[in-house]
Amino acid sequence: MHQRSIIRAALLSSLALASCSKDASEKPYAVEEVSLAQVSADLAAKATTSAVVTKAYIDRINTYNAALNAVIVVAPDALEQAAASDKRRADGKALGPLDGIPILVKDNIDAEGMPTTTGSYALTENLPAQDSEVVRRLRAAGAVILGKTNLSQFAGYRTTGTFSGSSVGGTAHNPYDLTKSAAGSSSGSGIAMATSMAAGALGSDTAGSITGPSNVNGVVGLRPTTGLVSRRGVIPNTELQDTTGPMARSVTDVAALLTVMAGTDPADPRSRDADVHRADYVQALDRDSLKGTRIGVLRGLRGYSEAIVPAFDAALDVLKARGAELVEIPQGALEDVTPEALTAEAWNFKHDIAAYLASAPPAVKVRTVEDLLAFHTTDPRESKIGAQYWEEAVAAQGGFENPERVRLVEYIQRKAGPEGMSALLAQHNLSALVAPAGGPADVIPDDGIVRPGQREKGAPSLTWHAAIGGYPVLTVPMGAVDGMPVGLSFIGAPWSDAAVLSYGYAYEQAGYKRVPPEAYKKDVKPN
């Protein structure tokens, strides 16, 4: 069978892949709730092999994915990658701590051997000729690229409501309560981390797409400083805000992934300063890093509710106990820029998606947002989802020089930058800011649309400000509301990723201990 047919069958089937180790006598490895760091240590100690670990993760995907729709496809060569890692270790040529570690990547990130669909049937033939830069770096470190995770279609830039999942991947379900949302757009990566379907995962973030799923799935996620990680080979929404970032079950594991992911890529001009700022983020973690810091406390942002106040106040008590001085930031210090940012995004999506699709394989028939909209109107699998944002992008005329776009971009970058969080950090002499990452997960309505997007002025959005200003945002579990996880977000100045990770690590070590989900296991018999 032709390779493309094999991949298409894997994509659209129930992930019925061979998942047996070559050596059936090898001792099984229980991966549930085992950290990336522990898997790495066990591989280094020869307590297990990458083939056994990879098989264990594939077995969990085959067992639990049907109820969750976290994973779209498992890499056909996952076990071959693992075997190659085991040979390197046997020959004394291990590539580093990530060698043999299975990692899932969001399905808007190019990885050879699997289509990059961004959840749409319009792109099922989009077989990239080369890896994205971030996947290339992971492979160079020896990681096993295990498969692709589900997402909000086109990373959320499609409908004014939030669609829970995608046409290709199905509706994404929260593992703590299958009736509730896993948020977006990196929903599959969040679910997969919560349920131990891999040691780590990649998400992407335009305005909260890592923060949201980390918040409601009880995992750790980092939106890095924009430009620290290359965006080459990632289906774009807007070059002004997009970034890729790591997700895992601990800050240490996120730091280990970022250490490999970060760096300058000539193909992404925004990353030109990344090598100057990159670090060994694991070595930078310090459980005493909060001592002597001044942490600004943000309240009243979009998604803030009385239900999360007890968990947030408890988290603040931990920060104080670890030596931080808390500074309450007056409400109204930030302005809501979401309506203007969404309007400006139409021009960028129109330009940036065409630039990505220009190099897609000949089998991909869509090349512009106009082509996507036409596909949407004629394919019944796609037309059930709204396409309001695409309609806005089609209507965006005049390119980047359009005076309205110029005005909007200047406004949002000023309000989110020098007059936004940068101003707060400077005026109050702050080391970082903290805020609730959001509320608990919403119930998924029958049509899969969680809520309409906000286009009127309202409470300012933490994630939109961070995305426009390019700030790093780390989200860690901080508690639960009626059994559903909620997270705490740390925000720092651009290029302060190491410090932000260290603050989150100090909180994680002393604060709320993550409670793994159990609801997704109900009525499912493990293999």
Image (cartoon, grey):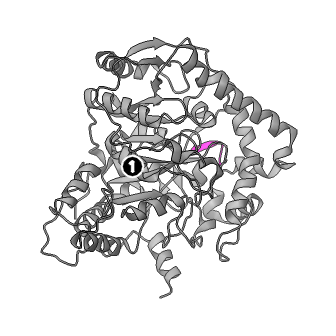
Quadrant holding the C terminus: bottom left
Q: How many marks?
A: 1
Q: How many other residues sit within 10 Å of disc 1, few (<14), some (14-19) or many (≥20)? A: many
Question: At numbered mark 1, what does the secondary structure look like: helix, strand or loop?
Answer: helix
Task: Label the magenta part by its dominant secondary structure.
Answer: loop
Residue nearest the viewer, comparing 363 with 158: 363
Q: Relative to residue 281, is residue 482 depicted above or below?
A: above
> What residue is rendered at 59% in x and 48% in y?
271
In which image quadrant can residue 255 be found?
top left
In which image quadrant can residue 310 be found?
top left
Q: Where does residue 297 sit, x and y in percent of width and height?
A: 47, 17
Residue 330 inside the magenta-drawn segment? no
Q: Where does residue 325 sit, x and y in percent of width and height?
A: 39, 13
**Farthest front residue?**
276
Tell me which amino acid carries mark 1.
Ile
Decide if residue 109 is on the left or right side of residue 379: left
Decide if residue 357 is on the left or right side of residue 325: right
Decide if residue 123 is on the left or right side of residue 190: right
> What residue is rendered at 50% in x and 19% in y?
298
> What residue is rendered at 59% in x and 70% in y?
126
Q: Where does residue 43 sit, x and y in percent of width and height?
A: 21, 60
Q: Relative to residue 460, is residue 347 depicted above or below?
A: below
> What residue is rendered at 45% in x and 24% in y?
434
Q: Where does residue 119 sit, x and y in percent of width and height?
A: 55, 59
Residue nearest the viewer, comparing 266 with 334: 266
Is there any visible trace of residue 458 in the rendered image?
no
Magenta span covers which residues? 158-162
Decide if residue 524 is on the left or right side of residue 206: left
Residue 161 inside the magenta-drawn segment? yes
The residue identified by callout 1 is: 191
